[in-house]
Image (cartoon, rainbow, N blue to C red):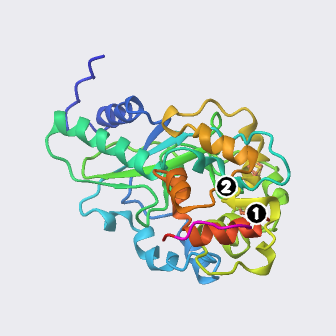
Amino acid sequence: MARAQAPHRGDSAALAHWVKGLALEEGATLAGIADPRCPVEHAPQLLSWTAEGLHGPMAWWPRGDAQRLDPTSLLVGSRSLLMVALAYDGHQPQLPDWTPRISRYAMGRDYHRVIKSLLRRVVQGMERELGLVGWRACVDTAPLAERYWAWQAGLGWIGKNCLLIHPRHGSWLMLGGLLLDVELEPDTPHPARCGRCVACLEACPTQAFRGPGRLDSARCISAHTIENREDLLPPDFDPMPGKWLFGCDDCQSCCPWNRKALGASPLLAADPLLDARQLHGQWPRDDASWDELTRGKALRRMTPAMYRRNLAACGGGTGSLPSTP
Ligand code: SF4
Ligand code: SF4
């Protein structure tokens, strides 16, 4: 199908519509525009979160705060921020109680690569019609407050579980941002629709929420299994609540907005081999099968040493396990 021709550079509303169309054609589930030059409304909450040490095991987090509050510092001359979301299937199959489990987003291809590649294709589409544009793609690889900007771009609201929620796709979404030096008309932020629900705050097995939207990462399974690089986990995480080997979905699977979430993008489909291994508790015991299992997946953020530690905390750490870095 022939692509629509780009509108005139000076027509920011029509250009925004066209660029969002490019993103959707390339496989984004949702696309919206925010203005990165606007002050971050959530700045006080972001700064106090860091000041109180609620970033927990993410020791690198405070270093990015200044840039997090000013995305234009990530790309000189930024005038627009295209935010995209890709849906994945967050429903965990029925698993036996003894099986260590993996957060659903990590079951497929590495979303960093998938979304960055999508955003590069958007840039190529733009440059075919507009000539060179200045851009920078951010997919958890730069200090961009992705959820905040996705909310600003109209993709959903930030739930009490701190995640972006879309009325039809729930929170089973991975986000990416594309800073551009092209003027695009921004979308309108989405109104919050959590209402009086507190299901996520109550479902957290480690009581990691200090209040709505206030997560203490030092108490979060996801933060420890993915970001904690210490040899030993804190005592509250060994044995691991819920047998989470990598990530944790408990504050999402309870969310009413996820019950009827629409279909997932094929770009983030779960790997059937990994699904089968999880179901039968067949976790790699040697370097080669570890390497094969995690190649091209976000799961690889967990080093073999972390894998051994997490698996042991899940009760499965016997026998020889991979040793390569
Ligand atoms: S990811 Fe798990 S441990 Fe972390 S806040 Fe959500 S439910 Fe709690
Ligand atoms: S579980 Fe309820 S409070 Fe939590 S994010 Fe979902 S709708 Fe909001």
- 249 with respect to 19 (left or right): right
Picture residue at 83% right of the left edge, 52% below the top? 199
Q: Please, what is the dominant secondary structure of the magenta stretch? A: loop
* Whole-percent x, y for residue 316 in the image: 76, 63
Q: Is residue 193 magenta?
A: no
Camera-side residue of 49 and 237: 237
Q: Which residue is mark 1?
A: 316
Amino acid under disc 1: Gly
Residue 324 visible: yes
**Picture layout, residue 86 above or below residue 112:** above
Picture residue at 50% right of the left edge, 43% below the top? 85
Q: Which residues are magenta?
A: 318-323
Between the C-alphas of marks 1 and 2, the distance is 8 Å
Q: Quadrant of residue 317?
A: bottom right
Amino acid under disc 2: Trp
Point out the tag, 1 or 2, that comes first from the N-terminus. 2
Q: Name the secondary structure under disc 2.
A: loop
Camera-side residue of 292 and 58: 292
Q: Quadrant of the N terminus?
A: top left
Q: Quadrant of residue 84?
A: top left
* Whole-percent x, y for residue 110 in the image: 48, 50
Q: Which residue is mark 2?
A: 283
Picture residue at 42% right of the left edge, 32% below the top? 24
